[in-house]
Amino acid sequence: RKEVEQDPGPFNVPEGATVAFNCTYSNSASQSFFWYRQDCRKEPKLLMSVYSSGNEDGRFTAQLNRASQYISLLIRDSKLSDSATYLCVVNANDMRFGAGTRLTVKP
Amino acid sequence: NAGVTQTPKFQVLKTGQSMTLQCAQDMNHNSMYWYRQDPGMGLRLIYYSASEGTTDKGEVPNGYNVSRLNKREFSLRLESAAPSQTSVYFCASTNTGLQERQYFGPGTRLLVL
């Protein structure tokens, strides 16, 4: 079983849609959590950290459920520019990356 | 600031050849990392250096060596390349460790024939 699991997608949604990505992790000792965004053939870039109380940054909302070892990312009012692969990242003793969920937002 | 830079951007090797991937950061970060990214696998940590003068193995270190030349530079060496090492290699850095966001270089695409 992978340490960090994500639905690979692809998710194809129209502009303006709301889309949610899920991620589960296996190491209960994990301490910090992140969502990274990776554009095609580019390096990953931090989208947002994920805090226990949940956090929001504009159209993006991240949630953490430690009991269920589950992280989510919600994107509201999707834009064409949101098309990318979203990586769930979990840190225990080292950073473990999910394989990513690919999102395509269409006009 | 250039951030994290990597050279080369692309490389084709024959099985058994050696090469060194270079990485440098100008953010005065203490920690540096090398990852490989393969389809369907996510990024996997090869080696990391928590501070100048130290290096440690990550998840997939076999077939690689690293050198933390100074605070800015962290190189990855393939002594005898194998087709299984065909991948995209990313270097990253952080200031104090894994609790912080990582800044990634643009990547090196390596094909081993």
Image: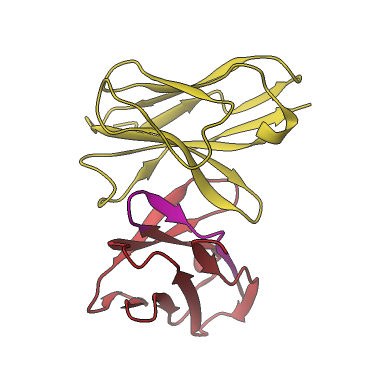
Chain colours: A red, B yellow
Reply above or below: B46 against A38. above
Across and down, in percent, residue A100 comes to: 55, 62
Q: Residue B93: name its quadrant.
A: top left
Q: Quadrant of the C terminus of chain A?
A: bottom right
Q: Does the magenta stretch include residue A43?
A: no
Q: In this view, does B33 lie to the left or right of B20?
A: left
- Where A31 sits versus A77, above or below? above
Residue drawn at x 32%, y 76% is: A66
Residue extent of the magenta highlight: A91-103
- Tell me what residue is drawn at x 47 percent, y 72 percent: A23
Q: In front: A70, or A72?
A: A70
Residue A54, percent from left and from top? 27, 78
Based on the displayed image, in which of its 4 quarters is residue B18 positioned? top right
Where does the image place residue A44, in percent across and percent down from the top left? 46, 50
Point out the image quarter for the N terminus of chain A.
Answer: bottom right
Front residue of this view, candidates B66 and A59: B66
* Residue extending furthest toward the right: B113
Residue depicted at x 54% and y 54%: A39
Q: Where is residue B60 in the image (x, y as percent from the top left)?
A: 53, 39
Residue in the foreground of this view, choosing between B46 and A36? B46
